Amino acid sequence: MSKSTCLEPFVLSIRPTQLLRAAIRDLLDSVESRQKKYNGSDIRGKVFRRLVEAKFSLILPSKPRYMVNMYPDSFSCSDCEFFIGDVVVHVPSFPGEVVISKCQHNIDDGFHPIIITTCQRVPVAEGLAESAGIANRLEVWDIEQFLSMNLNERGLFCQAGRKDMASRLVDAYNKIIDACETDPSLKIEIGAR
């Protein structure tokens, strides 16, 4: 049993006075705090991957092909890939040169790569892509905006709709955690703490 299994679930607080992106940022900040406390675990990577997977489960008619690749990269220990049509979505904990190299291989194989990472790491990924000469063939998205944009759109840009979509995302996420992870403390609750 890992140390983190005794912890409470993460909380996504949806308040009428707070932007959804800020609520997602608060959630991801609590993930980062736990990651620092339990540095030997891949808490950040698991939560990021499962949130993206949950979003895809809500918006796509069929489940994307999904792969997790382990890379001995000094910036990340794992990268998750989702194959959707002619797109490969990478969700690395930290975008490093190994992920950029993988994106180059995706391009060579006829795919359009996208990296989803934190807003603080977007410039890192963009700089690495520029150095590799693929900046104009690779999209880099901030996970906060990636999630909040979809929840706002699908919630029809109203408070009740956003809250409903956030609840649906959390439900889908928690089902994935139940099915695929062994640590129940990775779950997320909707609430105020």
Image (cartoon, rainbow, N blue to C red):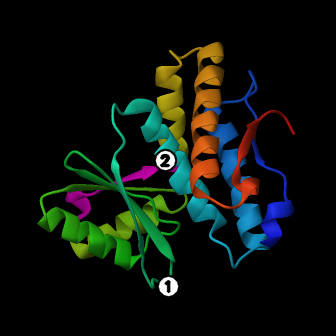
**Depth check: 189 or 5 in front?**
5
Q: Which residues are magenta?
A: 134-143
| Residue 71 placement, left or right of 172 | left
* Residue 78 percent coordinates (x, y): 48, 72
Q: Position of residue 42 (x, y in %)?
A: 62, 70
Say what amino acid the circle numbered 2 marks. Answer: Val
Report the Cα–Cα distance between label 1 and label 2.
23 Å
The quadrant where residue 116 appears? bottom left
In the image, residue 84 sits, relative to residue 6, either above or below, namely above
Q: Which residue is mark 2?
A: 52
Q: Point out residue 65 in the picture as x, y percentages from the top left corner.
A: 32, 52
Q: Earlier in the sequence, mark 1 or mark 2?
A: 2
Magenta residue check for 80 = no
Residue topped by disc 1 = 74
Report crowding for label 2: few under 14, some 14 to 19, many 20 or more residues within 10 A (C-alpha). Answer: many
On the image, which quarter does residue 20 sit in?
Answer: top right
Q: Position of residue 143 (x, y in %)?
A: 51, 48
Mark in the foreground, 1 or 2: 2
Q: Is residue 156 visible?
A: yes
* Residue positioned 34% across, 46% down in the render: 64
- Image-based side of 34 in relation to 127, left or right: right
